[in-house]
Image (cartoon, grey):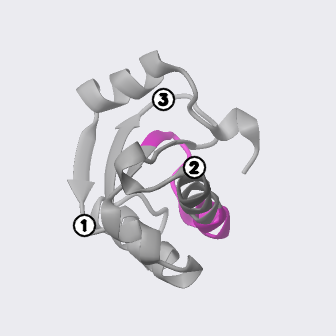
Amino acid sequence: MKKQFRIKKNEEFQATFKNGNSFANRQLVIYYRKKEGQKHFRIGLSVGKKIGNAVVRNRIKRLLRASFQALEQDIKPCYDIVIIARNQTKTMDYEMMKRSLSHLLYKEKLFKHSK
């Protein structure tokens, strides 16, 4: 995932939390908001310190980025998306992470076409 497609600034995270919609499953929480005129979706990842040490948190973020990269062609372009990892993500592998993320995106109709 290219760096220009990531949300980095705290103001952008807060705007997504405040003005966006949210949905959750057991592993992940998604916040998203529509931004007109945006050519590509942007993602922000949040993994709290309660989940594990830096190695565990970075692994979770790496798996989430890889999952987004695999689903990149199917996600609607005009959204800012923030993903918050829950405690169960520390035992997940890539396929489980991708399936959980797909579930959230499908439920919130963020795919271009119905899967």
Horizontal side, residue 73 vs residue 13: left or right:
right
3 left or right of 55 in image: right
Tell me the quarter of the picture where residue 48 sits.
top left
- Above or below, 39 against 69 in this view is above
Q: Which residues are magenta?
A: 66-81
How far apart are the alpha carbons under marks 2 and 1? 24 Å
Count how many numbered circles sit on residues in the image: 3
Outermost residue toward the right in this view: 2
Q: Disc 1 marks which residue?
A: 25
Discs 3/2, front = 2
- Residue mark closest to the camera, 3 vs 1: 1
Amino acid at the residue labelled 3: Glu
Q: Give the answer, above or below, for where 21 lies relative to 28.
A: above
Residue at the disc numbered 2? 54
Residue lying at the far top of the rendered structure: 11
Disc assigned to residue 36: 3
Q: Is residue 52 above or below residue 93?
A: above
Quadrant of residue 39 in the image? top right
| Viewer can see residue 114 | no
Answer with left or right where residue 81 lies relative to residue 4.
left
Say which of marks 2 and 1 sits in front.
2
Under circle 1, the secondary element is loop
